[in-house]
Every structure is written in structure tokens, then in C-alpha cells.
Image (cartoon, rainbow, N blue to C red):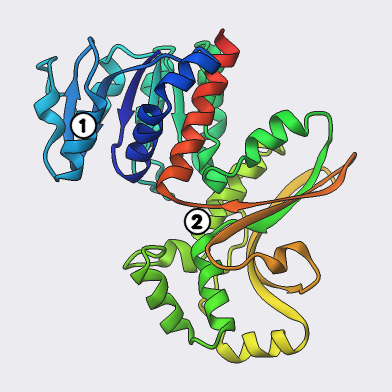
Amino acid sequence: MRLVFIGFGTVGQGLAELLLAGRDELAARYGFEWTVTGIADTAKGSAYDPGGIDLAGALALAAKGESIAALDRGGQGWDALAMARHAEADVLLEATYTDIKTGEPATSHIRVALERGVHVVTTNKGPLALHYRELAALAQAHGAEFLFEGTVMSGTPVLNLVRDTLAGAEVLEMQGILNGTTNYILTRMEEGLSYENALAKAQALGYAEAVPDADVLGWDALAKVTILANVVFGAALEPGDSPCDGITTITAADIARAKAEGKRYKLIGRVWREGGTVKASVAPRLVDMGQPLAGVMGATNAVAIRTSALGEVTVVGPGAGRAQTGFAMLADLLTIVRRRS
């Protein structure tokens, strides 16, 4: 299977490390043999070799801050879009930065690959939140797979769980903690820190960006509930269709008052059916201590899935991380191997 990486940052490198470490087992156990024909990254350069790029060499160059262009044997000098359009590939691995407002440039990378009949695996929330129906239809029209497990809870398999394990059980509602950064901040505030100090700790640990708006204003969670609404519930929502509130107005006094009442604040993303429509929301909510979501602390994610046949199923796991999100892409690759074998 010929792979092309579009984006070779934390997630792309995490996947590369998993591919290299598990190469023999992946071949023996799943029949998954791979070669990387292209890598394109805005910061790290571009390399193309239809005969196969040295992936370990690419990781070594990236670790030293050197351009991977030294590995290029194609002589094309392609940028990411040209790589997606022209490289010899069976699967495009799209792991560029997320733009929740436009979905670009990832949407264009995905679109041109699917138009060629190239399978796509992505961790990018923007294209899914904004253009899921278009891209899914494009994949179907061209006989390509379009998989995106890592967009909601990193390596924790929410979408695969609903699609495969819970097949036949109608999903009535999904709600959960879909942003680890805000959950970490709320956890530290319960320990006595102010919002400002808890945010600073999250930034120091790399959980929050220098400009943390996507997390603390709820936008990241909003993109994820939009994906769940459209993929799981068959809706046609856009992020702007749903109410969204973050955690910036919650004070230490609010946290203390909730704790005294046996409750905890959690930023909850929710998707549910109401009559004949699907609705979604993101907002801080008070959760009783006895509820499963109340016990999810730190930078951990969780989602409770209410079904017609099984009642409520709660999944807890890491919502971010180099290896974790890389694993989500690997799981999607193995899904393609199984479906196409």
C-alpha cells in the first residue's frame, strides 16, 4: 500500500513511528505492507520518491529541524496540494492543522485525492465539520474510502465503536467531555487554582495554545459535536447552527459551590434527536458526582452513548497525543486493508 503524508507534524510523525515499530507484525497479522511515496509539510519541506522514501530518515531529519527535501528523488518540488493531486498513492494521510472556520487547506487536499479514487485518512476536524456530506459523496462516487476516527477523541475509538460494535443499536443521544484542555483547567480549578492560573498550567504543559480560544470558548468541542451529528445521526449541521458556550465565565467560587452541592462543572458537548430533527450544543454543565462523566478528570475525554438496545455505554480515553492520534490513523489504515482485501 502506497502512502502519502500531507502534514508531518506531531500526528504524522506519531503515525510514522507506529508504522516503523510495528512493520513486521502489521504484515504478519493483518497483511498490511506499506511504502511511503510522498511527504509534504509546510514547515519541514517536501519529498517524493515513487520507489519509496526512507521513513526513518524523514523522522530523523524532522527531529533535527532539517528539511526532508533531502530525501526527494522525484525532482518535482511539489507543495501539499500538488502532492495530493499527482503522487502515486493508494492512501492520502491528511494531518495538517485544523481551520474550523474554512476547513482549508485540508478540504482541498482531501477533495483532489478522492477525485482520483485515492483513499483518505484524516485527523482534521475542519473538513468533517464543514464539508462532510460533500466529501463522503465524492468518496462514494470514486470508489474510495474516507475515514476519520481521530477527529473526535484521538485514538479512543468512538466512531468505530458506533459504526461496527454498536451496529443495529439506534443511537439516541451522545454527550461527553470532548476537549481535554478545558477538562484539565476545570480539574485544576477544583484543586484551588484560579481560571487564569489553571490556563497558564495548561499552556505550560502544551495542552493549550498561546491563544487558547478554540479550546476555552468551546469551538473545538463544537466541531466535534457537529461531526458526530452529521456522521452518526445523519444530520446536515454546520458549526454555526448550534449554541456554543465555553468555560471563561466560570469562577473559582462557582467551582467551590458546585463541589459543596455534590456536583462538578464539565464542558459538555451533546447531540440528540428531538422530534424529527437532530440538535447539538456545547456548554458548561453541572454533573452529579455519581455520574460517570463527573469522574473524568484531567486532560481525559469521555462520551456517553445512549442507545435503543443497550441503554447507555460510556467510553473514556485520551483525547489527544502524538501516539494516540497516530494510532487512530493506523486503525483507519487497517480498516481499509480489511475492506479491500
State whether residue 139 is above or below residue 288. Answer: above
Q: Which quarter of the rendered picture does the N terminus lie within?
A: top left
State if disc 1 and disc 2 touch (CB < 8 Å).
Answer: no
Which comes before the other along the chain, label 2 or label 1?
Answer: 1
Measuring 38% from the left and 77% from the top, which residue is drawn there? 200
Q: Which residue is mark 1?
A: 58
Amino acid bearing label 1: Ala
State whether residue 185 is above or below residue 259. Answer: above
Q: CA distance from mark 2 to mark 1?
A: 30 Å
- Residue 261, percent from left and from top: 77, 86
Amino acid bearing label 2: Asp
- Residue 6, percent from left and from top: 31, 31
Q: Is residue 162 left or right of residue 68?
A: right
Measuring 70% from the left and 31% from the top, which residue is drawn there? 163
Q: Which callout, 2 or 1, points to the residue nearer the camera?
A: 1
Note whether residue 2 is visible.
yes
In the depicted view, which residue is nearer to us: 27 or 153? 27
Q: Which residue is mark 2?
A: 220
